[in-house]
Amino acid sequence: MQLFIGGACAGKRDLVAARFPDAGWTRIDELGLDGREHDLRPGTVRVLTGWTRWLASALATEPDDDRLRGRLVAALDALRDAEREARGEVVLILPEMGRGIVPMDPADRRLRDLAGWLAQDAAARADAVWYVRHGLARRL
């Protein structure tokens, strides 16, 4: 699993598209979170985007942040297991939001916090983590 993370309009999508030109792209908010509908076949690359929209809709329906984070961790583990079984590659494109600024609105704070936890949990499971800024990637 590879993780590409950076702010809005940092160039993550273009960089991933150039590195994985034959990859299939899926929005996680359309796929669902269980990771079983990933369509990862042997030797293929699946890029997953759309995390901010999924997080926002999940936060609207789930009041328990710990339970929601647990669902995210289970989904990441399922994706990693599917990647290993298929001998394929899963590429996550995640937003980096906040940069230390704490929103006044509690809903915005929850979204930022959950996005940060997702990034931490994804980075802990990824084989490579790339931070993208201004279209440039640095492996962390």
Image (cartoon, rainbow, N blue to C red):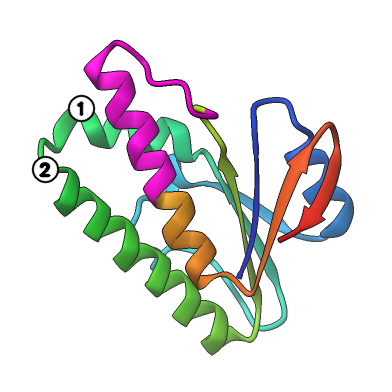
Going 34% across and 37% down the picture, which residue do you hit?
Answer: 113
Going 48% across and 51% down the picture, which residue do you hit?
Answer: 119
Image coords of residue 52 (percent x, y):
45, 33
Image quadrant occupied by the C terminus: bottom right
For disc 2, the marked residue is 64
CB atoms of marks 1 and 2 within 8 Å: no
Which numbered disc covers residue 44? none
Foreground pick, 66 / 59: 66
Foreground pick, 103 / 27: 103
Image coords of residue 13 (percent x, y):
74, 40
Question: Which range is magenta?
Answer: 99-117
Query: Is residue 1 among the parts visible in the rendering?
Result: yes
Which numbered disc covers residue 60? 1
Task: Residue lying at the far front in this picture: please name it.
Answer: 100
Going 25% across and 20% down the picture, which residue do you hit?
Answer: 107
Crowdedness near tag 2: few (<14), some (14–19) or many (≥20) residues, C-alpha within 10 Å: few
